Image: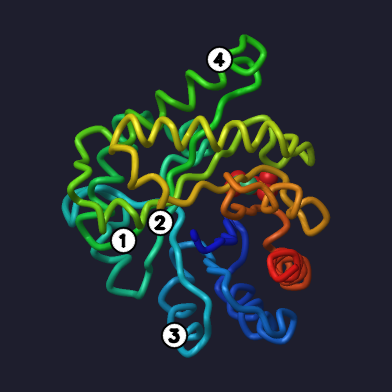
């Protein structure tokens, strides 16, 4: 059984003070929940402080990007070593906003994925088709290609490492638009992603790799996705910014799983 994960992607929102306040209030908003991995991907400047605040809680810290080198003359960049040292365990890689605004292509994403693994970080790989690609009927081909290129050169024998990977299906047209994918379409995409993983690393390992859905997920629609066997949770932007709505979303998944 794969453990569900609900991941907050705060993007470029929240100052350090706002991030700290969220974390102070969140446990009370959440109440008792178990069996769900809760990951918060915060802006870089908040990571060290949030890491200390998260000690003794069940929250896990993530970052939203990183460079692939350990150190070097890369002004303005943050390295995997730096992330690990402040207590980061997950890192979002290949988000469509990075691909679109910062020119990240599959080759760069591949370098980052390999680097994250080698520094003991777990990548959250984002893949997804644009509206144009969807309208041209290219969704499945785009997903398979993004997965294949992102994982190029990784070996199935590195099983322990690869099983820490999370892949998020994030159709570009659904991000921040209030128009999520339909549950069935998202499930189909998750299956395509798992098949692409199997083509890359063999049949068995992808059964351990979690595939999430992301794009306009909120407390009302989250279980449309998480009730589907192929989907192991959600990557959430806008609705993760307020502790009440993020907490209610996690509670919804928790109650639905308990039946
Ligand atoms: P959204 O963002 O939930 O605001 O659509 C999701 C994401 O970009 O990861």
The quadrant the C terminus occupies is bottom right
Q: Nearer the viewer, mark 3 or mark 2?
A: 2
Q: Nearer the viewer, mark 4 or mark 3?
A: 4
Give how far apart the Cα atoms at labels 3 and 2 are: 18 Å
Q: Residue at x 54, y 31 (%)?
A: 128
Q: Secondary structure at mark 1?
A: loop
Which one is earlier in the sequence, the residue at label 1 or at label 3? Answer: 3
Residue occupying the far bottom of the picture = 56
For residue 164, side relative to residue 97 (left or right): left
Q: Secondary structure at mark 3?
A: helix
Proximity of marks 4 and 3: CB atoms separated by less than 8 Å = no
Query: Looking at the image, is 58 positioned above or below residue 93?
Result: below
Proximity of marks 2 and 1: CB atoms separated by less than 8 Å = yes
Which one is earlier in the sequence, the residue at label 3 or at label 2? Answer: 3
- For residue 91, the mark is 2
Q: Residues within 10 Å of mark 1 (few under 14, many from 20)?
A: many
Query: Looking at the image, is 254 positioned above or below residue 94?
Result: below
Give how far apart the Cα atoms at labels 4 and 1 are: 31 Å
Query: Looking at the image, is 48 positioned above or below residue 28?
Result: above
Q: Quadrant of residue 55?
A: bottom left
Q: Residue at x 35, y 75 (%)?
A: 87
Q: Which residue corresponds to mark 3?
A: 52
Which one is earlier in the sequence, the residue at label 2 or at label 4? Answer: 2
Proximity of marks 2 and 4: CB atoms separated by less than 8 Å = no
Q: Quadrant of residue 13?
A: bottom right
Q: Which residue corresponds to mark 1?
A: 121
Give how far apart the Cα atoms at labels 1 and 3 are: 18 Å
Q: Which residue corresponds to mark 4?
A: 138
């Amino acid at each position: 059984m794969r453990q569900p994960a609900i991941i907050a992607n705060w993007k470029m929102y929240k100052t350090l003070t706002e991030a700290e306040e969220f974390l102070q209030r969140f446990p009370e908003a959440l109440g008792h929940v178990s069996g769900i991995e809760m990951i918060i991907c915060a802006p870089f400047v908040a990571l060290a402080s949030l890491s200390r605040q998260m000690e003794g809680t069940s929250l896990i810290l993530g970052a939203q990007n990183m460079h692939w080198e350990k150190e070097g003359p890369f002004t303005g960049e943050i390295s995997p070593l730096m992330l690990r040292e402040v207590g980061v365990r997950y890192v979002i890689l290949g988000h469509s906003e990075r691909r679109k605004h910062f020119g990240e292509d599959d080759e760069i994403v591949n370098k980052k994925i390999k680097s994250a693994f080698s520094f003991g970080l777990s990548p959250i790989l984002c893949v997804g088709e644009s509206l144009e690609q969807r309208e041209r009927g290219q969704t499945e081909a785009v997903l398979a290609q993004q997965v294949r290129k992102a994982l190029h050169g990784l070996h199935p024998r590195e099983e322990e490492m690869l099983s820490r990977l999370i892949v998020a299906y994030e159709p570009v047209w659904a991000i921040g638009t209030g128009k999520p994918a339909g549950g069935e379409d998202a499930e189909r995409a998750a299956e395509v992603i798992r098949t692409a993983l199997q083509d890359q690393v063999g049949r068995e390992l992808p059964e351990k790799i979690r595939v999430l859905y992301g794009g306009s997920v909120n407390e009302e629609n989250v279980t449309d996705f998480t009730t589907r066997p192929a989907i192991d949770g959600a990557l959430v932007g806008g609705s993760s910014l307020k502790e009440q709505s993020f907490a209610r979303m996690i509670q919804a998944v928790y109650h639905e799983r308990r039946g």
